Amino acid sequence: MPVTTMIKMKQGKKRISFSQNRELVLLIILIAFSIIVQVRNTQYLSLLNISDMLVDTAVLIIISCGMLMVMLTGGIDLSVASIMAVSGMSTAMIMSSNPGIPPVIIILLGVMIGTALGLLNGLIIGKGKVIPIIATMGTMNVYRGITYLVANGEQITASEMTEGFKKIATGKLLGINTLIFITIVVAIIIYFFLSRYRLGRRIYAVGSNSESAKISGTNISNVLVFVYMVMGLLCGLCGVLYVSRYSVAQADMASGTEMYAIAACVLGGVNISGGSGKLQGVLLGAILIGFINNALPMLLISSFWKQAIQGVIILAAILINVIILRRSDRMLKKGRI
Amino acid sequence: MKRTLSIVLVLSMILVCFAGCTSTSTSEETQGEQSTTVSENTATATDETASQSAASEDGSRIGLVTKGAGIAFFEAVGDGATTAAGELGVELDVQGPTETTAEKQIEIITNFIARKVDGILVSANDSEALAPILKQAMEAGIKVISYDGDVSVDARQLFVSTSDPENVASQLIDTANEIAEGSGEIAILSAAATAANQNAWIEYMKNDLEEEKNSGLTLVTTVYGDDEMEKSYQEANGLLKSYPNLKVIISPTAVGILAAAKAIQDAGLEGQVYATGLALPSEVAEYIEAGIVPKAFLWSPIDLGYISVYVMNAMLKDEISGVEGNVVTCGTLGDKDVTLDASGNPQIIIGAMSEFNADNIAEWKDVF
Amino acid sequence: MSIQRNTMIQHSSIKSMFFKREMILFYLLIIVNIFNAITSEYYLDVGGIMQATRVFLDKGFVVLGMTYVLMIGEIDISVASIIALCSCVMGVVYNAGLSLPIAMLICIGVGALCGLLNGILVAKFRELASMIITLATMSLYRGIAWILLGDKAAGGYPDWFTFLSSGDLFKIGGVGVPFILIVFIVFAVAFGVILRKGVFGKKLYMVGNNAETSQYSGIKVFNIRVIVFVIIGIMSSISAIFLTSRLATARPNVATNYEMEAIAIVILGGVKTDGGSGTVLGVVLSMFIVGLLKYGLGLNSICSEIILIVVGALLVLSILIPNMSQIIKQNTQIKKVIRSQKY
């Protein structure tokens, strides 16, 4: 980002660059929101509840990380919920009829299914040159239809699941809940991939200026295929985690996740036309959205107000974001920073 | 040349998709024969016409609309209905929308009307919104019977009710009373805020709570999970965190009771908080065995489908006209009478609810 | 410089693409009809087809509005919520005692207001994409509808109101022509003519193609954006009127998923999401293609899961196949050039 480098070059002193501003804004909104809820319901900021909320948000965080990479290339993926559904439903059905399979293999199967579907997305977008919003809108329907067909009218419920499978979401690894553990691992991998690896930097290049990316030797279509394949992989993983977490597999599961993931990315400062966005912002954005969803039931208000409140908060968050952005932009131009 | 090629390719893709249809929710039975898979549709189009006209001489054509595809309860309804159709020799088509909305059901009913079916069985996602299209169906000479989810009285000839709503409510409140040992806080986790059945039960439950014997119970709140697992779980969690003295969560919907039970389990509150409500035994088996759900109730969806088809058949054959006193012989399930509900409208109640508890869950969970 | 040259080149090839796309859609419509007629004996009943169009025509008004929105390179995913809110407001106001025509006017006013808010936010805060703004207002508008009606339904409309969606305006040879069809055709022609011939339409194309140069050539881009969102707000309220008429009731949860279906139809009709190309004719054709295809499949008792897959596949393939044939053509041309250069 040219402006941040400019700032850093101008002053050797520590100044808050405006990309850090954004994360600060999100943090402030999160804290302000939490205080309001805490006043209504003293249980909100208890350690138990915070860790519960993190577990609940884990899937959203992972999907948002994948969505980050997709949006960095200037694309979008509306089929994430449907890929999760195919993966979750298929693995649940396989597991219930073959209880001998260890959970790790089940997870691998889910990942493979997700990767295959993501690969299809990537081929349609990267090689078929179909724009992402259409391609993923179409595959969203196709994959969801496939989920219904795979389910064949059944639901897999807790009694048909093996203990090991259910433990995936409720067990602990190194003292932390498995879901949080997986989320941290995924976030770290993606962080290092995007910042240290050439392919990661290429993803930024494709989104910000595809012409110069092409000239400098990046095979754009391959990058796109890769990005959607990774998104599919993460969705496949999350499908299994989702089913394990709730101990039920239904054909209409996870609907709406794609919108939350997109919102999390945008709140986190990802440019919807591609080229810029940081993982830290996305993590904060996902946590904010996840916590809001969890907090709404705790606000002890009539159910009918919840959706409006959610809309107002998201609207306020994005508007505050922009206003702060503009202010620091103006201050920058005036040489104050 | 390229243009026509593109079009031909698009069309062949559509045809290929047909091959994937594994008739989950469609079943056409012509006197017990197996359903034709759709990939043979184009070839056997003429056969279909022949068999359909043959069927309408021998038997009628019934369209059954469920609330949604892929819902276990309605899959079982479809199974029961198919059995009855086979026994009676009528043609049955079971269709469920991919979204549990009234608009999608209207699309299906429009198709049924265009196909000139003889009777439509429907469980409405919205009791008023379906009224106009069903009235059109009746004007076209099609018999309309609602089951499970009723519609406005002037939009159907008869209603096959799963239960007496007062009875459902009192069973649930009595169970809550039992679990809470006479006094304590309870909460209700329902489906969608617009779900007519659930709202009726909640209404009666609130009435019951004013009775003397239930005076020890306090209803702290009613929340809605929209029959979505994630949302219901978050609501259940909210209940557990916000009301530390909560004893029972009543959930008159399967997804709700599963979410409540899981939330109780995850929070480690087994033994402190319990859940009860309406659910298929196969779904709640785990939690009944774990003791989180001491009791759950439901009527048989298989019987529901079975009886509905028999009632429709009786109406199509003019054996009944949908007034009080009519009797329908429903195959292996015996006679069912048309009675009057609280507002004086004719209905048939399929039977009593069954209770599922730790003693009988082992056998029930394989039934439905 | 090169950007301008590119857009100019694109413009002339876009013109020829217009024609291509609409012809493909026209052929597709004919094929769908033939296919339906062959596979189902019940299809070729004009009365039945008219009935079937009622199911998707109320969505058609939103589709027309969405055409303009996508044309200028924006998107509006809050339309379904606007429909729900307008419908609920109309129901509440009518049941509170106001006359129905007044209630309908208020409904349109609410739609315009929602569109105005969307438009101002989109036009003012250019850093935010219209997708994210309308994502937030989507929750907000439907949320207000929930606050208004809660778990109640607002009904009790008179017969003439039901006529709007279910009645026939006149009969041709014994077959009734739905009133809603006539209204839709009027609107579609208006939208189409404005887009092709009107000054406003030309401005839409220019803003969609390149907003910056349009600004420099004197077009008030801010106003255009606001107006377009107000238009789709009003079209949503008209959709709401017809939908409420068809359902004879208003609830906060109506019109779920309409926005996705509308966007899919518009894109299938040839409007590009980055703006600047497309015709109303293409969109109308695609609406009938999708609607009649779903009807025909339904007549064959295809399960709704399969219909979902088919529509999704149709959307993707309708862009993928022309793209692939173009890529193959380009590759063979390149190979020809390389081969000819060898000698």
Image: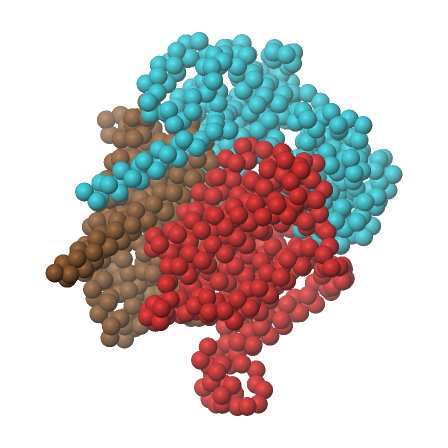
Chain colours: A red, B cyan, C brown
The residue depicted at 65 percent of the width and 45 percent of the height is A103
Q: How many marks?
A: 0
Residue B33's place in the image compared with C148, above or below, is above
- Is residue A134 visible from the viewing direction of this image? no
Residue A272: x, y in percent? 44, 65
**Direction from residue C306 to residue C183 in the image, left or right:** left
The residue depicted at 18 percent of the width and 60 percent of the height is C338
Between residue A180 and residue C333, name the one nearer to us: C333
Between residue C218 and residue B27, name the one nearer to us: B27
Residue C48's place in the image compared with A251, above or below, is above
Residue A62: x, y in percent? 58, 58
**Direction from residue C26 to residue C72 in the image, left or right:** right
Please, which residue is most extreme toward the front here?
A: C343
- Is residue B334 visible from the viewing direction of this image? yes
The residue depicted at 63 percent of the width and 35 percent of the height is A98
Between residue B77 and residue C214, name the one nearer to us: B77
The residue depicted at 53 percent of the width and 11 percent of the height is B88
Residue C124's place in the image compared with A165, above or below, is below
Residue B322: x, y in percent? 56, 16
Q: Quadrant of residue A38?
A: bottom right
Residue A106: x, y in percent? 61, 44
**Direction from residue B356 to residue A130 in the image, left or right:** left
**Direction from residue C120 to residue A24 in the image, left or right:** right
Q: Quadrant of residue C1?
A: bottom left
